[in-house]
Image (cartoon, rainbow, N blue to C red):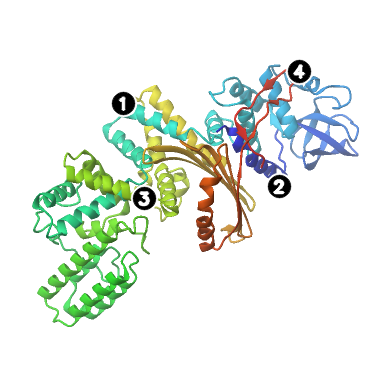
Amino acid sequence: MTATSFNPIQMQQSALTLNNQPLTLKQGQVFQGTIKQLYPDQMAEIQVGHQKFIAKLEVPLKAGDAHFFQVTGTSPQTELKVVTGPMGQTASQSQQINQLLDSMNLPKTAEMQQLLAHFMKAQLPISKEQLMQAEVWLKALPEGVTKMDALQAIQKMVELKMPMTNDVFQALISGQKTTGMVSVMESFTQLLTKEIALPENLKQTLIQQVNAIAKPFEVETGSLVLAKSIQILSNNAAAMSEKIQAMNILKEAGILPQQATLQNWSSFSDVKSVQSNQFQQAGEVIQAILTTKSDNINHLVDQLKSWTANQSLLTNEQQQSLNQLIDRFNQLPATKQTLEIFAKQMQEQFIKAFAENSSERLFTQDANALSVKDHLLSLLKHEATTPLQNEAFMRNLMKNSGESPQAMIQQIVTQADAHVQNSMDSKAMEHALKTVLKNLGVSYEATLSNKSADLQQIAHQLKPQLHTLLQETHISPQLKEAAEMLMARMNGMQLASGENGHQHQLIMQVPLEFFGKKMDATLQWNGRMKEDGKIDANYARILFYLQMASMKETVIDMQVQNRVVSVTVFNENDIIPLAEPLKSALKIGLAEKEYQLSGVFMKQFEKAQPVKTPVVGQQEEHSGVDFRV
């Protein structure tokens, strides 16, 4: 899909920004303005766009005339020089532009004329230096970037007073695109794997992060492989060879210690003191039991029952079974041997329960943001691990399982993959988007300002690692260019996003890969903020730009007005038969979130017509698709 589809709301946002903020002028800027009223001492009221201000004129002029003005002073008052004669009377637009170019000693190139025509229409002040820099960019546009894309990016830089640097320009150009993120990632990955001058530790870290983005469900697949391996180890009826294969694959991933055997793989050999009122992971519960003093048993029992009752990853039956075990323990004398037997029984029930629940609670977390895999690993590792460490264990497990020559291990992986595919729903899609955005680290600079942020997790994101990569002096020019292009894409999302008073706009470009199918997805959210600074969920406009293998270009326009949702899907194919069965599910899903679906509409794209630029003799065609906003 071309960037044409991405411009309408951006331009609305730009207009809002200009109209709602006071106009500030700088020395040397030129602009088109209309004299609204004259005052003594050559003072005049000048209108630029929708704004008016008072300035001192160098020569007397007539009210009602429009001129090009140049700012010659700003303190103590704004002073203006007339650059061209009255417009719209005898001179054509091209003559007025030529007159302006002469007076400012600017080259009369086609690019410079297009720039002036564009800013004349937008009624924005721009300086000679900005025009000179913008002309350089227009003369050397990257492949696939139209002059209209470039002009709108330059306009945004001027409006928002961004630095007129090539990095900002390239980032804005990238931020307007709705396709190509997947190909940019692929190109970077291919060059990265071939790079020989890069330090091996940085290279491997980057490759791991790129793989994490390319495989958003790998951790969940690994969780299923972990659960199945544990079930085999716990099954007394399983063949000895199967148990050994399951244990070895967990050893290779670093989940079980190398000295583990089929008899002691779940034993707690390293017991650490844990305060019973602070445990979160199941492994910490077992540690608390083993380290509890005899005079603190009653408090421990209360804590165990409370933890079990609040653990959403356990079924009601499992909670009841654990409570019965706790009650039986409470009736026995609190000896060291009793505590050890009780801890062993609790651990066995936990392992069995969480392993059984892994497939049904694949994308679910408990109140402490922990998943089934986190609890299982805490029961095997005998120590509190972070979610980031647990994800690394799962990716390592998937890597070793995929490379395993054992038919049983390959069968487990195949079954896990199939289960993940069959579990695809709204929660899975939400999880995939969050996983990719988190690993990209698009907003890591803002995250750094959060005092409670996990700095270790931030350091593993792709964007800060790209910063490190670009500081390397010995990398190949090709890899450096690919890294800069990827960085520009991520910076472009931030620059394209923004706020204006209560109005906010958010842009996200996400390279998605599901089971071998790759897809570019761009989300553009426009909404408003409430007085308390939170998003107003009652009103929003959300556009999804999707580039899919089968359906090709697809745009979903979702509008929310007072929690009433209307959805329009733009696609060239007849997708009504595919959509009809899904409408009821959408209606129910929205109702669960207290939204009402008013309708789902299917439309085809309107083909964009060739557009002439304002400069005589110059023409630029826009191809692709467009739709009115």
Amino acid type at mark 4: Asp
Q: If you read the primary sequence from the N terminus, does the residue marked by circle 2 or circle 3 appear first? A: 2
Q: How many numbered discs sit on the rendered protein? A: 4
- Above or below: residue 324 compared with residue 565: below
At label 3, the amino acid type is: Asn
Pointers 4 and 2 in contact (C-beta within 8 Å): no
Q: CA distance from mark 2 to mark 3?
A: 50 Å
Q: Say what amino acid the circle numbered 2 marks.
A: Asn
* Quadrant location, the N terminus: top right
Q: Disc 4 vs disc 1: which is toward the camera?
A: 1
The residue depicted at 9 percent of the width and 54 percent of the height is 261
Q: Earlier in the sequence, mark 3 or mark 1?
A: 1
- Asked if residue 575 is positioned above or below residue 583 in the image, the reply reads above
Q: Earlier in the sequence, mark 4 or mark 3?
A: 4
Q: Position of residue 615 (x, y in %)?
A: 73, 22
Residue closer to the observer: 481 or 453: 481
- Secondary structure under the numbered disc 4 in the rendered image: helix
Please state which of the two labelled residues, at mark 1 or mark 2, is closer to the viewer.
1
- Write down the residue under mark 1: 194
| Tag in front: 4 or 2 | 2
The kind of secondary structure element at disc 3 is: helix
Q: Residues within 10 Å of mark 4 (few under 14, many from 20)?
A: some
> What's the mark number on residue 422?
3
Give the quadrant of the C terminus: top right
